[in-house]
Image: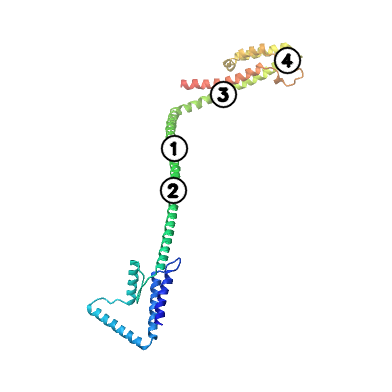
């Protein structure tokens, strides 16, 4: 039974080392070592009495060794810890695995380990190269994006600067216009204050001239009716010429005697009308206002002269005051 256990333990380690892809971890190997030792201890318990005597002697020797170590003052190391230290030492030195009867070593398992290590290194190198390529690609894309964004930012900054300059110039222009408007307003207000006393004078002069303007309008209305009558007689085939001549003489006398008509110089206009206004509508015309042309122009002209004379008289009165 003990021989079977001695053979089984190396087989376990060799199988653990010969896994194709994932080599066993140190913790798993230590667990298997511990289980193997437990199996060995169980087999020793089941062995015949002579072996138990041998084990008792071995235990006695171990206890004597421990007493010697304790008496010498050295630290007592447990078998499990000692096995871990032996395992790590063997791994560092590149040897086999520790066992009670010596070192277990397999050249094929070492080749498999080296092969797996090389595959792992190759995979790690490929993965690292892939990561570096992705990293460099990402860096290039980020740099390109940063350059494009920097260019767009510069364009926006230039545009903002131009807008700012335009706003500043527009603001200055508005300030200048505001100053000019304020100066114009001050000038207008000053003129208003200066002309304020003249306003009352102007209003009073206008009220005084209203009477003269009213009399002039009444005079023009009378002359309009008389001239319409005169032109109707001129265009009529029934009325005699003597009636037209009498009406013309009366109009000339009134224009020369009336002060308003004399101010408007109506005598000259009436003479021109009597001499040159010969227009008549057709024979069947019943509207007298359609006869004559020159007289209507003179009547409109005299209305405008009345307005002009009014303001001229107001100006003269203000200047005299």
Q: Closer to us: mark 3 or mark 4?
A: 4
Circle on res. 162: 1
Please give the residue where the numbered disc 4 appears in the rendered image. 235
User: Badge 4: few (under 14), some or many (20 or more) residues near its Cα, within 10 Å?
Assistant: some
Left or right: 82 as drawn, with respect to 12: left
Report how far apart the C-alphas of labels 2 and 3 lie in the structure.
98 Å
Q: Looking at the picture, does residue 98 appear above or below residue 290?
A: below
Report how far apart the C-alphas of labels 4 and 1 lie in the structure.
80 Å
Please, what secondary structure does the residue beneath circle 1 have? helix
- Image label count: 4
Mark 3 and 4 residues: CB-CB less than 8 Å, in contact? no
Please, what secondary structure does the residue beneath circle 4 have? helix
Please give the residue where the numbered disc 3 appears in the rendered image. 211
Question: Which comes before the other along the chain, label 1 or label 3?
Answer: 1
Please give the residue where the numbered disc 2 appears in the rendered image. 140
Report how far apart the C-alphas of labels 1 and 2 lie in the structure.
33 Å
> Which quarter of the rendering shows the N terminus?
bottom left
Between 125 and 258, the residue placed more toward the observer is 125
Q: Looking at the picture, does residue 233 appear above or below residue 200?
A: above
User: Residue at the spot x=38%, y=85% of the render?
Assistant: 45
Quarter assignment of residue 276: top right
Please, what secondary structure does the residue beneath circle 3 have? helix
**Residue 16 position within the rendered picture, expressed as x and y whole percent measured from the top left:** 43, 71
């Amino acid at each position: 039974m003990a021989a079977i256990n001695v053979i089984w333990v190396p087989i376990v380690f060799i199988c653990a080392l010969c896994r194709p892809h994932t080599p066993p971890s140190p913790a798993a190997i230590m667990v298997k070592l511990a289980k193997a030792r437990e199996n060995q201890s169980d087999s020793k318990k089941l062995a015949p009495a002579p072996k138990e005597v041998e084990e008792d002697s071995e235990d006695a020797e171990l206890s004597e060794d421990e007493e010697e170590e304790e008496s010498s003052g050295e630290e007592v190391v447990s078998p499990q810890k000692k096995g871990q230290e032996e395992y790590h030492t063997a791994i560092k030195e590149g040897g086999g695995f520790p066992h009670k009867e010596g070192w277990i070593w397999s050249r094929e398992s070492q080749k498999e380990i080296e092969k797996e290590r090389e595959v792992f290194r190759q995979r790690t190198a490929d993965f690292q190269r892939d990561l570096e390529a992705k990293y460099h690609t990402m860096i290039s894309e980020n740099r390109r994006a940063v350059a494009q964004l920097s260019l767009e930012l510069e364009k926006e900054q230039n545009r903002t600067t131009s807008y700012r300059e335009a706003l500043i110039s527009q603001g200055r222009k508005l300030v200048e216009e505001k100053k000019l408007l304020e100066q114009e307003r001050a000038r207008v207000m000053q003129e208003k204050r200066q002309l304020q006393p003249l306003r009352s004078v102007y209003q009073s002069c206008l009220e005084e001239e209203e009477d003269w303007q009213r009399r002039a309008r009444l005079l023009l209305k009378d002359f309009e009716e008389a001239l319409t009558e005169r032109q109707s007689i001129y265009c009529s085939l029934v009325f005699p010429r003597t009636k037209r001549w009498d009406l013309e003489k009366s109009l000339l006398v009134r224009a020369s005697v009336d002060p308003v008509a004399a101010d408007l110089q109506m005598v000259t206009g009436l003479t021109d009308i009597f001499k040159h206004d010969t227009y008549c509508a057709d024979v069947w015309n019943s509207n007298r206002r359609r006869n004559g042309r020159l007289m209507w122009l003179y009547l409109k002209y005299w209305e405008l002269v009345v307005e002009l004379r009014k303001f001229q008289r107001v100006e003269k009165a203000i200047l005299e005051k």
